Image (tube, helix red, strand yellow):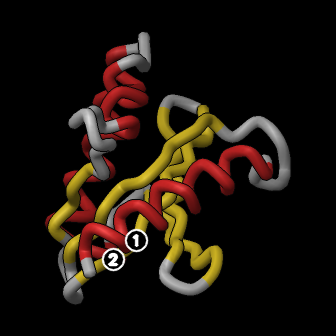
Amino acid sequence: MTFYVNYWRNPSGKAPVEKYIDEIANKEERAELLSALKGIQEYGTDAIGVEFRQIEGKLWELKIRAHGKHHRIFYVVFKGNEMILLHAYLKKTPKAPVREIETTKQRMKQLMEVKQ
């Protein structure tokens, strides 16, 4: 199954995951990350260089290693194949920091209110 990848936007129209990617200083690293997202659109869960992990319920995590760094992107899927990227961060510790998960859950809650 392929996915239509989209960015969650806050009420003012800003997309935090898009901003996260744009702010990666290393052009090769940014290109690798964008290439992984494109691979998800084309090949779905068979995309090369991407791991998918369920966090809880509808909340999932993309694990992408780009230029030696471990990037994590939280997402939800709607209508079968619409993947909405909620939050991204650079992994530095074994477990996801509580702050990152709380931010994601807030965004997911806002998204669910709009989508229903």
| Label 2 crowd bin: few (<14), some (14–19), many (20+), radius 10 Å | some
Which residue bears the numbered disc 2?
A: 77
Classify residue 75 by image quadrant: bottom left
Residue 24 percent location from the top left of the image: 43, 19
* Residue drawn at x 42%, y 29% as measured from the top left: 20
In what element is the residue under mark 2? strand
Q: Are marks 2 and 1 in contact (CB under 8 Å)?
A: yes
Residue 50 percent location from the top left of the image: 45, 60
Residue 33 is left or right of residue 97, and the answer is left
The one nearer the camera, 100 or 111, is 111
| Label 1 crowd bin: few (<14), some (14–19), many (20+), radius 10 Å | many
Amino acid of disc 2? Val
Residue 90 percent location from the top left of the image: 62, 35
Which residue bears the numbered disc 1?
A: 76
Residue 39 in the image: above or below residue 81? above
Residue 42 is left or right of residue 44, and the answer is left
